[in-house]
Image: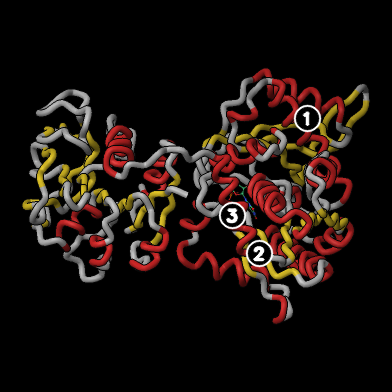
Amino acid sequence: MESVLILDFGAQYSQLIARRVREQNVYCEIVPYNISVEELRERAPQGIIFSGGPRSVYGEQSPRLDAGVFELGIPILGICYGLQLLTYQLGGEVQAAQKREYGKAAIIVDDNQDLLAGHQLGSDQSQTAWMSHSDYITQPAPGFEILAHTEHCPVAAVGHRQRKIFGVQFHPEVVHTPRGREILHNFLFNICHCSGDWTMESFIDTSVEAIRLQVGAGQVVCGLSGGIDSSVAAALVHRAVGDQLTCIYVDHGFMRKGETEQILTTFGRDFAMKLVHVDARQRFLDKVAGIADPEVKRKRIGNEFIRVFEEEAVRVGDAAFLVQGTLYPDIIESGTEHAAVIKSHHNVGGLPDDMEFDLVEPLKALFKDEVRQLAKELGLPEEIVYRHPFPGPGLAIRVIGEITGEKLDLLRDVDHIFIDEIRRAGLYKDIWQAFAVLTNTRTVGVMGDERTYDYVAALRAVASEDGMTSDWYRMPYEVLESTSRRIMNEVQGVNRVVYDVSSKPPSTIEWE
Ligand code: XMP
């Protein structure tokens, strides 16, 4: 498969570069900057992009490149630090600037043959670029021509045509560089001569092949939660190895209304997967009986989950592989420790030594929106494709205080009404996450002529990009009104409804 590789020097924008490349139908993956030259040669990408990075080429700890990379004959585009590094290593001059240049700068184009094709020579209003650097280049490496400069930056873009090595000091991947896409397009198509025939469908084909190659005739297990990541990973692996895959769905009893049925229908019936449904509801309820402390709840549920999963995995027989729905952002967020964390996680319950799993992680190069696209291609239902995030411990951390079966049932009904009203208003996809919480507070109410003393339900809906920070969602009054009315009428045991107007920080999205 045709691909472009990004050598990652620790830039915050690496993932954005990958996205921009894939948007142009060229498959792109991010790899560590110190990938070996042999591996690069083997993978034979159509082009290589050096990302930016937080360091200075003069720093003692700064990442350096194996010079062999320049000899591969594969076109290279260095961005920001990537450009400074290639300039430095190929004999040009990089200077430490006194002041960081940060923001938009007008680009003055000196050469518009290939990388900057379509640009006007000289300056033009549309030719602005986003700069974010302290060091800058004063003298390109021998053989390099200056393609553009700015008022403060003598070298904003360079190229060595014969060696097909190019670089830009600015960031073509961000929206603040209005013609950045065009510049990346020029690199991909004028310089790397990519064909641009990559689609999600072709991603499915290559993933299927790769999974088959990895797994061989081995047995594979997958923990299915009904969330999009594990669902897509399972569907993809199932397409690759069919009945060699066994999915294990552990119903801990903290799922939302109708969720278990949907998982069984979608995967067991529609996809005809081998699906083990473990009804562990009582077992989990016993584990959290009388526990009010959120951390203790979480720990007990987490441990029990692993224990149940292991017991079932052993029953599958000699499963050697475990499917994980790991996405690219998960990898970045947990740094290089990621693989280790996963291992220890699945070993917490004390997996027998002879039951070490190899991980199958078919989504690890993708972003959430790409996984959604993939889910649609694979034929997963809308409810799964657009489902809001749901925490592992489920409703157990949304019933505040001690958990009982009755409280869980109450919460399931309240939550269902809220989500139903949001869907009816057409707002579901607009909201990052919406749910109900059953507080541990009871208040006095009046129903008919009777006094009531029932629970307060809280509604929470948040807007967020990634769940790390969030703002409370400005829910239209009509939705709050209809939700509240229906809860009061339809759910016995709740006589007061409140809406949570806290942002994160200082609150968190979940209450526990
Ligand atoms: P908080 O409450 O920390 O939540 O603001 C941020 C996001 O993470 C989800 N969340 C979890 N997801 N296991 C998960 O898989 C968990 O234990 C867990 N706790 C919180 C939460 O729903 C929100 O999307």
**Residue 90 seen from this side:** yes
Mark 3 and mark 2 residues within 8 Å of each other at the beta carbon:
no
Residue 382 place in picture, x, y as percent: 69, 33
Q: Does 389 appear above or below 298?
A: above
Q: What residue type is labelled 3?
A: Pro
Q: Which amino acid does label 2 sit on?
A: Val
> How far across and down, in percent of the image, does residue 223 sit?
73, 57
Q: Say if disc 3 is inside 8 Å of ligand 1.
A: no
Q: Residue 458 appears in which quarter of the rendering?
A: top right
x, y (%) of residue 191? 27, 42
Instruction: Write down the quadrant of residue 212 in the picture.
Output: bottom right
Given the current orientation, which residue lies at the most extreme top position?
478
Circles 3, 1 touching at the beta carbon (< 8 Å): no
Q: Quick one: 98 or 226, which is closer to the camera?
A: 226
Q: Residue furthest right?
A: 449
For disc 1, does the CB lie below 8 Å from ligand 1? Answer: no
- 52 or 99, which is in the foreground? 52
**Residue linked to disc 3:** 362
Counting from the top left corner in percent of width and height, residue 86 is at: 20, 58
Mark 1 or mark 2, whichever is nearer to me: 2
Between disc 3 and disc 1, the foreground one is 3
Q: How far apart are marks 1 and 2 (CA)?
A: 43 Å
On screen, 340 above or below 138?
Answer: below
Residue at 87% x, 28% y is: 490
**Residue 40 is drawn in which quadrant?**
bottom left
Label 3 and label 1: CA atoms lie apart by: 35 Å
Q: Which of 382 and 320 is in front in this view?
A: 320
> Sequence order check: which comes first, mark 3 or mark 2?
2
Query: Label 1: which residue?
Result: 417
Q: What element carries label 1?
A: helix
What's the mark number on residue 215? 2
Mark yes or no: residue 296 visible: no
